[in-house]
Image (cartoon, coloured by chain):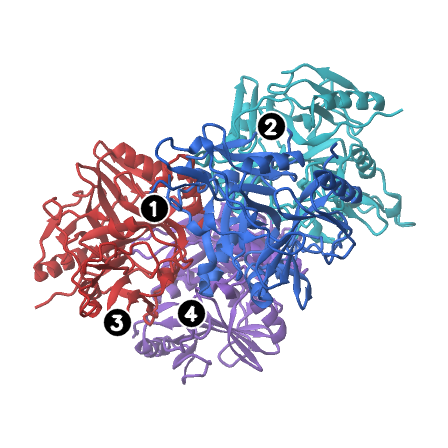
Chain colours: A blue, B cyan, C purple, D red
């Protein structure tokens, strides 16, 4: 017997474990320009300029960098109950927590979802000032709001099925000629995504993304990092994704968590919004401008914590049957946040193709 | 007995009557950069770069400039039936039209709504290519999508009640200290608005707005008009609205229809999205930068056609009781697209304050 | 007998008298984003991000707002001597001052030029850090350098002849059909201007302009002022000048001094650079977008101080013979920073046409 | 006995040999947005929007892609004679050509300069319309003017000495701790450069650069190329150079000639403009954002033609004494447009470090 899924509005916050709160504050507040809602000895609660809920990012001090929690907002208090029923029926670990278990957040349900991620569902949250027009506080790169999560999973098709079951639409995919799914962008709010599912050792968090208003603000972040001789934090970009049409920049925070600054995706809210299906051989999917991608962007991602607070072990992607090259002994597996493939085995030690164009 | 309202997704298209199709084509295609989906001897069907439905703007040749129809898209074919029932119960004129009655649009219901506007509800529509990434076709000011309608009505409170009954949320308002409502921005899709209701002789169409990606694209439109010595088409802006935070530009097409180019509003999709209430005395509501407004922007608007194709007579706003200045004989009425007030009567013939800051 | 003029490089600094240093600091440092080179109890020395000389703006506390000095840099120490000889031969008041008379500036010559302005010529100056790439210090509107002075003079033709004698080129003019000169833009460095000469009661300083990199930085200044509810400091713009092609914004500082933020003019350095001659009847000269101009922009300007530190009396423009409307008794005189005309006399008390398009 | 050098104003035009004029026209006119001044069966004459001389780029059909000529404009007709005398005294091949030898260009002197490059000096040139404000003709990436040449030479110090002798200033350099010069940016007009000298097999043309107004225009060029699936023409960027502060993009035309689109350098016109000296070990010199550089950008460049129209043989850079690693047999030579070093010899076949950060 099943229960209906909760009515999710959107991706709403993440809690990251960082090892040095001062360093994290420098990165997220001084460089990225997020606003501080609250500060505790062991945690910082941050939000972007258009956000009026208490926070969209919690930074919590800990010994090992990790994703502690992804928060989805649901449409009302009753939907928190719906989430509790839904995950209980799925047999997932489910914990009801009282208001304030996460500061600023009301009654919530925490689960380890079937993909292995720690997820919190909530509706009630403390309102704070929306600072959209506080331009005197805007640095040159003021982020407007949290936009999405991007996660690595060993089985993209299974993850897609799970999120489809939660009522997420699919805006874009990367597929091969046999309709094997390499990556999927899925949404509740009518943008390109609230969650992106990409193949690789998982469960891991590939990145979270903050939206910003214009491309110049993304460029300014690069200039600030160069000025501070912290240009090594720029892992990829700025550039244009074929997928989503986003103008992007990927940074690594002092603990290695990956943050995307993101602008210019599009409205997806009509029921017949066409799914854009990119072929895995079209390199413009990942860089519309043909840019090579740093190997780290494909291989590195953040550990996720289970409901007991310990790291969730990862599983590698299965070998894709369709990609076995019969007789050669070469196996090809899909990894990476845009469905990039690597060849392994078969004595082909230099077969590692990361960062090169197909 | 009532019927539930149709589930409206968003403002989707308008049909404007223009007297010279060649002149209109020059303005909308050559200057604004809209794409031509289809062309007939007496009509042009246009869309913006991210739109995949057949059109968001129909220009139809006729003898007198007017708004022929505002189109709302509903969530499915059954919602067209719901619209038919809803407006029948309201006692409004309702006509069911077959697919193709508007080219590219499926089965639809046309009504004259209680505010006097000609409205079409539809779900089915022909899909055409979404040109988001056809950057080689982008002029410097490529519009992305139709964003909203702005209409003038003699009774804003009544119009607000009607749209609230249709399930529209309220993102922002202009009010006075007695909570009299001067203007309201209301939405179904999670942006600031699908429809703005502003006080004045009505029913009339104040403007339609196309969204664009960045402010530089708005500025480029101004430069193009200056280069062509058509700068007189710029009626107002560019500037920043306090209401909606939009960066705006208002143009007049060759028939006098007003078109806004619009960028940078914000997400409103959560159920508890706070309504921003601007006081009618804060001039930043209309221009965050303190700009004066051309009187024409307050007084001129497009005639709307009834279901019989003839102009709908307009009604002036009632004198607002709260604004009567007892004993002076001066009456103040609210007019204009942002709740601007004018004083009339009392022998004060030059009391017309349009375009001046309170 | 004449002496050759000094070899002037460019407009280099101004000294403004302000009545409240704290208020001025707020405006120039907090809002405009200039850098502080030095601070004294009675003076602030500021520069823009690409400047490596000690300052381009001195704010000095005094009882009455005024222009105390315009500084031109010459090509070497010997040219300071050349300036001394040149102005002595002209019979102008000339004072040699030692290094440090203006902090950060070396040996200099101060004159009251034939137009009545207090001018300083210098070469030696203290070098400080050029902060071009200190992006972490850039606010959203970082100015790059002082660009030009704009002054009001009663006789534009005479002022033009004086500056031509100093070796300034003419990039653009406003003229009527009889080649009467209403305004002239003149340069030494190869931009559109170092000095603009515009008709009106003079000598007065109309404005100084700082260049910035992109138009978005100009817009950000507007947004910051709106956010602080200081939008009344925006007197004109943003907009595009026909003359110079500049994207402009005019602000008034707390003492009423006018500051332009300016971007996108063009290279004028070849000897045959064509002079652009705008007809005084083409309204695009002042606003390429057809914007009306606030009357204050035409009538208000800063008092200038003589070499004795007292205000220089102003002279109105002569009545232009060519504009006398024979028999009507109406006289037309040229005033304003772009050659705008006003009709006076003839019993036409409301004939004041400022701010309206011809 | 020596002659004084000609008074050069600026880098003014190049003539490139291309193998397919239609393909070249597509690239330079349809994609980059240059204006066509004149067209012949075997040649195209192009200019940017702010240019009023006949052309800044000549594309001439030929069998082998090459640089046919670099044009410097001098300050007057007499300076053409000065050029003739100067190069004659240097013993360089010098040819006087009549007006029209290059269409649109007056009397000129053509030389093979001591570095091996074909150079033309001219003053007189046909004036055509300056299209600065023809915004209706601007595509999204309208270039404003030719900005500079960048050439590869085997001996940067010798090339620097030659250009210093021509009166060029030095705005920026790349040096090592022993003041060995790896690259130099030199100017006559007061921008960062008219010519950049970079180490490598030479004489070869590394690239020519067109300036544009804002960064968004550079990004638009990338988007257009992606839309046309011609993203492989993007060789490097967009990004920020540490040297010059320019926001850059490097493209390869259909014949492999490299074109830079360039914005936001700075004023260098004062006599004491400080030279910025970048250390060769600071990777921000080439990419302020830490971007890796494609190896082709270091190794590939255009052949140059001699005065007889045949390719000039190239010479490799000498081994730099200071870089010999005593005893290891490894020799290090400087190559590349920003002084990048490669190790060769010593049996270290994989020692090629192009494109990796030091």
The chain ID associated with circle 3 is: D
For the residue labelled by badge 1, is the local secondary structure a helix, a strand or a loop?
A: helix
Residue B57 disc label: 2
For the residue labelled by badge 3, is the local secondary structure a helix, a strand or a loop?
A: loop
For the residue labelled by badge 4, is the local secondary structure a helix, a strand or a loop?
A: loop
Q: CA distance from mark 4 to mark 2?
A: 52 Å
Q: Position of residue D298 (x, y in %)?
A: 27, 53
Mark 3 residue crowding within 10 angstroms, few (<14) / some (14–19) / many (20+): few
The residue that disc 4 covers is: C130
Q: Nearer the viewer, mark 3 or mark 2?
A: 3
The chain ID associated with circle 1 is: A
- Note whether B51 is above or below A219 in the view shown: above
* Marks 4, 1 in one chain: no
Considering depth in this image, is C17 or B207 the residue closer to the camera? B207
Q: CA distance from mark 4 to mark 1?
A: 50 Å
Q: Position of residue A166 (x, y in %)?
A: 67, 37
The residue that disc 1 covers is: A349
Residue at the extreme bottom: C98
Q: Nearer the viewer, mark 4 or mark 1?
A: 1
Mark 4 residue crowding within 10 angstroms, few (<14) / some (14–19) / many (20+): some
The residue that disc 3 covers is: D179
Q: CA distance from mark 3 to mark 1?
A: 43 Å
Q: Position of residue A77 (x, y in %)?
A: 79, 45
Numbered marks: total? 4
């Amino acid at each position: 017997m099943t229960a209906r899924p909760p009515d999710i509005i959107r991706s709403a916050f993440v809690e990251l474990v960082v090892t040095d709160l001062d360093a994290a504050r420098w990165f997220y507040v001084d460089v990225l320009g997020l606003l501080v809602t609250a500060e505790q000895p062991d945690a910082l609660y941050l939000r972007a300029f258009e956000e009026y809920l208490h926070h969209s990012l919690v930074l919590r001090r800990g010994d090992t960098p990790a994703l502690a929690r992804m928060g989805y907002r649901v449409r009302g208090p009753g939907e928190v109950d719906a989430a509790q029923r839904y995950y209980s029926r799925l047999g997932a670990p489910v914990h009801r927590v009282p208001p304030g278990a996460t500061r600023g957040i009301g009654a919530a349900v925490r689960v380890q979802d079937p993909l292995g991620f720690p997820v919190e569902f909530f509706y009630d949250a403390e309102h704070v000032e929306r600072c959209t027009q506080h331009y005197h506080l805007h640095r040159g790169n003021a982020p407007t709001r949290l936009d999405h999560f991007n996660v690595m999973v060993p089985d993209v098709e299974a993850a897609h099925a799970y999120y489809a079951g939660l009522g997420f639409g699919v805006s874009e995919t990367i597929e091969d000629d046999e309709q094997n799914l390499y990556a999927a962008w899925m949404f509740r709010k009518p943008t390109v995504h609230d969650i992106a599912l990409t193949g690789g050792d998982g469960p891991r968090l590939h990145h979270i993304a903050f939206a910003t208003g214009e491309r110049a603000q993304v460029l300014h972040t690069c200039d600030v990092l160069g000025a501070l001789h912290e240009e090594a934090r720029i892992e990829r970009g700025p550039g244009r994704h074929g997928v989503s049409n986003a103008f992007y920049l990927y940074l690594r925070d002092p603990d290695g968590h990956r943050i995307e600054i993101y602008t210019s995706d599009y409205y997806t809210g009509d029921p017949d919004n066409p799914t854009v299906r990119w072929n895995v051989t079209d390199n413009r999917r990942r860089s519309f401008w043909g840019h090579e991608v740093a190997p780290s962007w494909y291989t590195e991602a953040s550990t996720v914590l289970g409901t007991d607070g310990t790291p969730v072990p990862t599983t590698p992607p299965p070998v894709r049957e369709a990609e076995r090259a019969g007789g050669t002994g070469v196996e090809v597996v899909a990894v990476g946040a845009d469905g990039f493939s690597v060849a392994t085995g078969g004595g082909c030690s230099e077969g590692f193709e990361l960062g090169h164009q197909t």
